[in-house]
Amino acid sequence: MPGVRIFGCYDPRHDRDLLARLVRDSRSPDSPFEVVAWSGEHDRTADWEGDLRSALDGVDEVVVICGEHADTSVEMCAELRVVQERVKPYFLLYGRRGVTCTKPISARTADTFFSWIWEILKAQIGVTARAPRPSAARTA
C-alpha cells in the first residue's frame, strides 16, 4: 500500500537542507509517507500558483517545515495561504533544534509546532491525514 503523499513546504532560500532531511526520512523502511512535491522559488511572471494548485491536487497532506526565517519567507506565506484555501491538511514542523524557528505569517493562531522526532512525525502524519476536514468555502 502506498504511503501518504506529502508536499514539503519550506523556505527555499534558507532551508533546503530541511527538505532534504524530510526526503531522507521518507525513505526509512518504516516510513508511512513519501515526499512527492515541494516548495520552490516563485517566478513572479510564471503561473506558480496554478502549478502549486496542481501539485497540491496530487498530495494527501502538507508538512510545513519551519526554520529561523519562515516568518519572512514570501514563498511559504503564499503557499500556506493556497493550502488553507484548498483545505488541505497540514501541520507545522519545528525544523531546527537549538534555534528559534518561526511560523509563516499566514499560519493560523491555532497552528502549533510539532517536534521533528521520528515517532512524532510518523504519528502526526497519520493523525492529520485521517482527520476530518471542513469543506472549502464556496465563493459566488
Image (cartoon, rainbow, N blue to C red):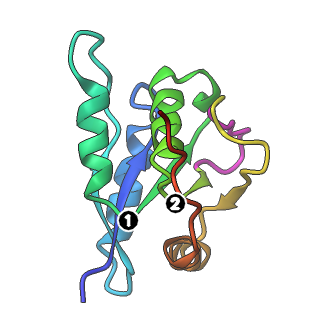
Instruction: Depth check: give the residue in front, 139 or 128.
Output: 139
83 relative to 127 in the view: left or right? left
- What separation in Å lies between label 1 and label 2 (alpha carbons)? 7 Å
Instruction: Depth check: give the residue in front, 112 or 116.
Output: 112
SS state under label 1: loop
Q: Which residue is mark 1?
A: 60
Q: Is residue 59 above or below residue 102?
A: below
The residue positioned 72% from the left and 46% from the top of the image is 98
Q: Residue furthest top?
A: 45
Residue 15: quadrant of the picture: top left
Q: Is residue 18 above or below residue 107?
A: below
Instruction: Depth check: give the residue in front, 122 or 54.
Output: 54
Residue 67: where, in percent of width, then height? 59, 39
Q: Check if residue 97 falls in the magenta segment.
A: yes
Q: Which residue is mark 2?
A: 89
Q: Residue furthest right?
A: 109
Q: Is residue 5 above or below residue 30?
A: above
**Which residue type carries mark 1?**
Asp
47 relative to 6 in the view: left or right? left
The residue positioned 24% from the left and 90% from the top of the image is 1
Task: Tell me which segment is drawn in magenta.
Answer: 95-104
Mark 1 near mark 2, Cβ–Cβ under 8 Å? yes
The residue positioned 79% from the left and 43% from the top of the image is 109
